[in-house]
Image (tube, rainbow, N blue to C red):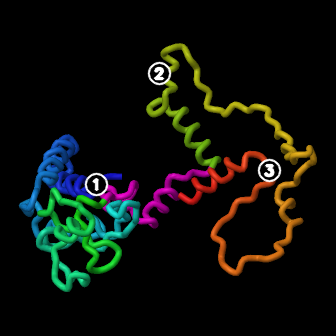
Amino acid sequence: EMSAIDLLAHLLAEDWCRGQSRQRQEGFRWFQNSLWRTGERWPQELTDKLMQTLNSEMGLRKLRVKCDYFGYERRFVVLGAGTKPAWGQTFWYEPEQRNVSVAEYFKTKWGKELYCSGLPCLELTKRGNFVPMELVTVLGAEHNLTVGKLRPEYQSEVSRKTTVPPDQRKKNIQDIIANDGLGPRLALQQKGVELATSMLKVDGHCLQAPTLLGDRGQAVTPGNYANNFHCVAPPDYSVPWGLWCFTRDAPRDLWGLAAEVKK
């Protein structure tokens, strides 16, 4: 996870260094320091061209993010970035029957004094829901600086390409070992160690399935025990999840587990 401002600093650094990895980290630190000290000033680096990039999937659009200024965490999807700073981005505030800026709203409604009101807001989940960038955190594994947002179909294709059947994996390992130019065989031979290209066969055996015992020592068959129960008065509403307890031991632990699951 990282702050949306830090992600913006990474994107600016990537654009600045033109792929030179040695300069990328230096650029990131410079832009990070500059953005967090923006105040009410619109950064000159946020040109129209860069804003177009931010509003594409190579930038911020469709990223999954979270906010916790409510006092608890809520998750959203980024629709895009606004074209005005937080102090200049206004909307109609129904309770006061007037237009207010995003910066003013978050200060009066949520008690959040913005340090970077000169940065654009992010539009989250629905049109018109603008949130200051400094209050948004990008969820982990959501963005790659080279290819943009990691789409599910892209991740699926990568997994497919990197998953090798056992027989193919075995052949690949043997081929590398047999190749003196690739594998460690030649270097080991110089040390007096021979490396065979055949797999070592070992004897194995299957362990007997364990027997589950109840509180009185009787055997319990997994999957059948609950079939002997019948609900006398089933609920007339949907139950999303539940816990089955087959002993009377440590009820406090059960309630503790239920509390953790609910989180």
Left or right: residue 244 compared with residue 59: right
Whole-percent x and y of residue 56?
Answer: 26, 70
Between disc 3 and disc 1, the foreground one is 3
Residue receiving disc 3: 248
Q: CA distance from mark 2 to mark 1?
A: 47 Å
The stretch in magenta equals 137-165
Residue 124, placed above or below residue 35 = below
Residue receiving disc 2: 187
SS at circle 2 = helix
Query: Nearer the N terminus, badge 2 or badge 3?
Result: 2
Q: CA distance from mark 3 to mark 1?
A: 46 Å
Residue receiving disc 1: 3
Mark 1: few, some, or many residues within 10 Å (few <14, many ≥20)?
some
Left or right: residue 158 compared with residue 3: right
Whole-percent x and y of residue 4?
Answer: 27, 58
Q: CA distance from mark 2 to mark 3?
A: 63 Å
Residue 125, placed above or below residue 225 = below
Report the amino acid beneath label 2: Ala
